Each structure stands twice: as structure tokens, then as C-alpha cells.
Image (cartoon, rainbow, N blue to C red):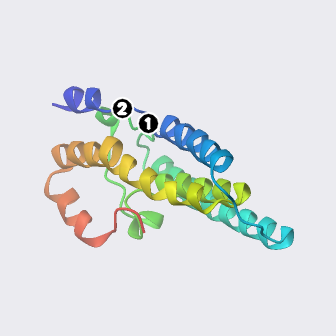
């Protein structure tokens, strides 16, 4: 069962991030942008990158402490259900980190249309990654995972 669920995961999250980065850039070339004062723009980008790093690194540290895999394509190596630390707030903090990186990119591009694509990123991640991971985790951890889902949000 675990091998079958792993084979359903086809688009790596980092590839999805890169695809949306490219789409956002193309949209910024095609549609009008905003004029943002450089000091606010830099401060916003910096804050978003710091938040992204916090979520992503916190998630990885929790997985390392639990001695379980961070590889979404090797769910068969999941040795424990991580529900502590940042995982009390979000079931997917590493993906939240990717989202904040995309938001920083959108601010850098100074384009609201590009920023709007971050919502499409969430929908794609939910469809192509999170939904399948949750199915696998339910299979692996059963009631423990179902109970955890009631306590922690998927994103934020």
C-alpha cells in the first residue's frame, strides 16, 4: 500500500514552486505592476523570506528530531507522526515556507496579478501533493493522523 501511494506523487513541491515562479514572472511582464517605495518593498521581501525560512527550517528540524523522512516521495520511510513544534500550528510548514517565498517573489515583481497566483499555488499543492500525502499518512498512522488533522490546520 505504501509503495502505491508513493507512486501517486508525481510533481515535486520544489518543481511546483519553480513553475509558479516562472508563471509569476511571465504575468509580471504581461500585466501592469505597482509602484512600491523601495524601503517598504525591501522590508516586506525581507520579512517574507524570514517567515519562509522559519516555517521551512522549523518543519525540517522537527522531522530530523523525530528521525523521519522529509522526502515527500518516500512516505514509506515515515517512521513517526510529527505533531509537535511548528506542527501544532500547521500540518505542512515546509509548504507554508514555499508559499511565503512565492509571496516575496510577487512583492519583488511588484505585481498584484503575480501575487494572486499564490492562491493557485495553494490549490495546486493541495491537489497534487497535500491530498495524496494525507491519504498516505492516514494509511500509515490511522486514527492518530485523523485525530491530528482535527487539531492542526493544513496551512495556517
Depth check: give the residue in front, 75 or 44: 44
Locate the N terminus by quadrant: top left
The percent coordinates of residue 72 (x first, y second) are 39, 38
Choose top left, top right, bottom left or bottom right for residue 8: top left
**SS category of the residue bearing label 2:** loop
Q: Nearer the viewer, residue 140 or 40?
A: 40
Image mark for residue 74: 2
Q: Name the residue under label 1.
A: 71
The crowd level at tag 2 (other Cα within 10 Å; few <14, some 14-19, many 20+) is some
Q: CA gap, disc 1 to disc 2?
A: 5 Å
- Residue at point 25%, 64% (across, down): 149
> From the viewer's perspective, is 39 left or right of 114?
right
Q: Residue at x 36, y 53 (%)?
A: 123
On the image, the x and y values in percent for residue 113 come to 57, 58
Q: How crowded is mark 1: few (under 14 residues within 10 Å), some or many (20 or more)?
A: few
Nearest the eye: 143 or 35: 35
Classify mark 1: helix, strand or loop. loop
The residue depicted at 50 percent of the width and 47 percent of the height is 64
Q: On residue 100, which mark appears?
A: none
User: Residue drawn at (66%, 64%), measured in percent from left and top?
Assistant: 48
Answer with left or right where residue 41 lies relative to residue 51.
right
The answer to whether residue 104 is left or right of residue 77 is: right
> Is 22 located above or below residue 57 in the figure?
above
Q: From the viewer's side, name the closer residue of 119 and 83.
A: 119
- Give the x, y percent position of residue 129: 35, 43
Residue 56 visible in the picture: yes
- Tags 1 and 2 touching, CB below 8 Å: yes
User: Which part of the image, by quadrant, shows the C terminus?
Assistant: bottom left
Residue 67 location in percent, x, y?
44, 44
Whether residue 51 is situated above or below residue 105 in the rendered picture:
below
Amino acid at each position: 500500500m505504501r509503495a502505491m501511494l508513493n507512486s501517486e506523487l508525481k510533481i515535486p513541491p520544489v518543481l511546483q514552486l519553480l513553475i509558479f515562479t516562472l508563471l509569476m514572472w511571465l504575468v509580471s511582464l504581461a500585466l501592469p505592476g505597482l509602484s512600491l517605495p523601495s524601503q517598504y518593498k525591501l522590508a516586506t521581501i525581507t520579512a517574507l523570506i524570514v517567515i519562509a525560512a522559519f516555517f521551512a527550517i522549523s518543519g525540517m528540524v522537527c522531522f530530523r528530531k523525530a528521525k523521519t523522512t522529509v522526502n515527500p516521495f518516500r512516505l514509506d520511510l515515515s517512521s513517526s507522526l510529527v505533531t509537535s513544534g511548528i506542527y501544532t500550528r500547521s500540518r505542512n510548514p515546509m509548504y507554508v515556507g514555499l508559499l511565503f517565498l512565492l509571496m516575496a517573489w510577487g512583492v519583488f515583481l511588484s505585481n498584484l496579478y503575480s501575487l494572486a497566483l499564490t492562491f493557485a499555488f495553494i490549490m495546486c499543492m493541495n491537489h497534487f501533493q497535500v491530498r495524496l500525502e494525507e491519504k498516505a499518512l492516514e494509511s500509515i498512522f490511522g486514527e492518530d493522523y485523523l485525530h491530528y488533522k482535527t487539531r492542526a490546520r493544513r496551512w495556517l
